[in-house]
Image: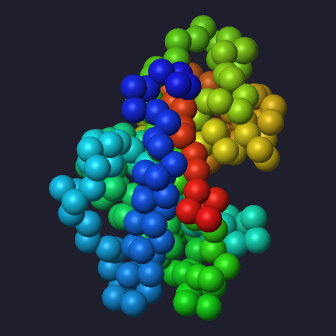
Amino acid sequence: MPSTDPHAGLPKALRARLVEVARGSIEHGLAHGRPLAVTPSEFPAALKELRASFVTLQIDRRLRGCIGHLEAVQPLVVDVAENAFAAAFRDPRFAPLSSTEWPRVEVHLSLLTKPEPMHFTDEADLVAQIRPGVDGLILQDGANRGTFLPSVWESLPDPRDFLVHLKHKAGLAANHWSEHLQVQRYATESFGDEDVA
């Protein structure tokens, strides 16, 4: 649910600090081939808490890499540093980022609230509950799993289309349905380079 997470809404200064960490980790990766090592104790309390994040890279508004975690596994500042490096150099959809591309890259961060399970009786009921522009979804059926961040609504504004494309991302057919299908939703706090400008 949006705005219910007690830590939602980082102050602009802390947002800017996280973007700087993400950019610093990519620059460190270009120079040394590994992510920037950060020491959580050197950062404010809000950046040391266990939180999940995604880092998305774009060039000319086109995706250039996106990596993250759906569940909180480490301090936020560490998560951002590692995901920024992975988005630049380990996204299997793209070649590793080059130093010539780097000046054109826009960095965007998404901080996730804890995913909440959705309860539905059938696909129509599920579609009716999805909140366009708000919900990020995690869809899973057996070993098949996929997620869309809320930012995907910009290109898929219809809930049914959103769900169909998410099924495809999870490796399922567009008309797939089973009693084992599980869906969770989460909200994100998103920001990027504009917060350090």
Is residue 83 something that shows in the picture?
A: no
Judging depth in this view, the residue of 149 and 189 nearest the camera is: 189
The percent position of residue 46, horizontal first and vertical second, equals 32, 43
Q: Residue at x 18, y 56 (%)?
A: 41
Q: Would you identify the image quadrant in which residue 160 lies?
A: top right
Q: Residue at x 62, y 65 (%)?
A: 197
| Residue in front for this viewpoint, 36 or 145 | 36
Marks counted in the figure total: 0
Q: Residue at 80%, 36% (x, y): give it.
A: 157
Which colour scheme appears in the figure?
Answer: rainbow
- Position of residue 39 relative to residue 47, above or below, is below
Which residue is situated farthest in the left direction here? Answer: 41
Q: Is residue 67 above or below residue 146?
A: below
Residue 105: where, in percent of width, then height? 63, 74
Residue 52 rendering spot, x and y as whole percentages: 39, 44
Q: Residue at x 43, y 51 (%)?
A: 14
* Residue 91 drawn above or below residue 110: below
Residue nearest the viewer, comparing 184 with 27: 27
Position of 45 with respect to 148 (left or right) is: left
Residue 160, visible in the rendered structure: yes
Frontmost residue, 12 versus 21: 12
Q: Position of residue 145 (x, y in %)?
A: 49, 41
